[in-house]
Image (tube, rainbow, N blue to C red):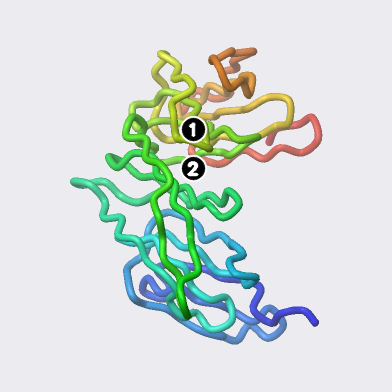
Amino acid sequence: TKPSVRFVSIGGAENGKIVAFDLLTGNIKWKWDGDGPSYSSPILMTMDGKKQVIVQTDKNLIGLTITDGKLQWQISTPPMQRFYNSSSPISDGQNLIYTGQGTGVWAVKILKQGNGFTTSEVWHNPDFNPSYNTPVLKEGSLYGLTQAGKLFCINAQNGQTAWADTLMHKNFGAILDAGSVMIALPSTSELVVYNPDKSTYKEIARFKIADTPVYAHPLLVGNRIY
């Protein structure tokens, strides 16, 4: 049978609550309001054979049961200075990767402990601080855009820096996995195409697509970019 809870949203309409809806009826199944909202999106992870909703809230990274929204574990992730939590968490097997302005990039393992769960740090890379973008995980490497507007690559197994480009873009941008290439669209409106190389940055092409800043996330459909 299909589970009745298939959609989870977080937003200001519910005053920062995490809300799960029944897709068939639109009825609210459960709410969680232990923290305020952030700019990131929830993801799903399977732990101990059961799905959890992973959410980056205003000051915490949390895991909730998908059936009733009960808190399973929590990591404190307070935003630094006047920054915001804006990057969505990333699932990598049983590891969870998260980042934020001024905090670096972290990987933790979610472990079953008794009737609940605990978290254990796997690695921490303090060199990069993505702000208004979520890095992309591809074949064991993490590709992103730093707070300073530089494209970078991290080894997702050990957290070591693979490379960082020296060209300055804007810190607001999208990173996309296009199969044989990676695509970045910072708010400079220069669409950058580069190789998903684990050892060095290799730019293939660059296109100016607008005279004003672009903040919308591009969409890849076949060989077209919208």
User: Which quadrant, please, contains the N terminus?
Assistant: bottom right
The percent position of residue 73, horizontal first and vertical second, equals 41, 69
Q: Which mark is residue 134?
A: 2
Quarter location, residue 160: top left
Q: Mark 2 is on which residue type? A: Thr
- Residue nearer the viewer, 201 or 25: 201
* Residues packed near mark 2 inside 10 Å, few (<14), some (14 to 19) or many (20 plus): many
* Residue lying at 34% horizontally and 39% vertically, measured from the top left: 104
Determine the image quadrant of residue 61: bottom left
- State whether residue 131 appears in this view: no
- Is 27 situated above or below 200? below
Q: Position of residue 198 (x, y in %)?
A: 58, 22
Residue at x-position 53% and y-position 68%:
53
Q: Residue at x 45, y 35 (%)?
A: 159
Whole-percent x and y of residue 75?
Answer: 35, 61
User: Which disc, if any, is residue 144?
Assistant: 1
- Tell me how many marks there are: 2
Q: Amino acid at mark 1?
A: Gly
Secondary structure beneath dot 1 equals: strand
**For residue 196, above or below residue 72:** above
What's the distance in space between the residues labelled 1 and 2, CA to CA?
Answer: 7 Å
* Quarter occupied by residue 12: bottom left
Contact between marks 1 and 2 (CB within 8 A): the answer is: yes
Could you tell me which quadrant the C terminus lies in? top right
Residue at the outermost left position: 81
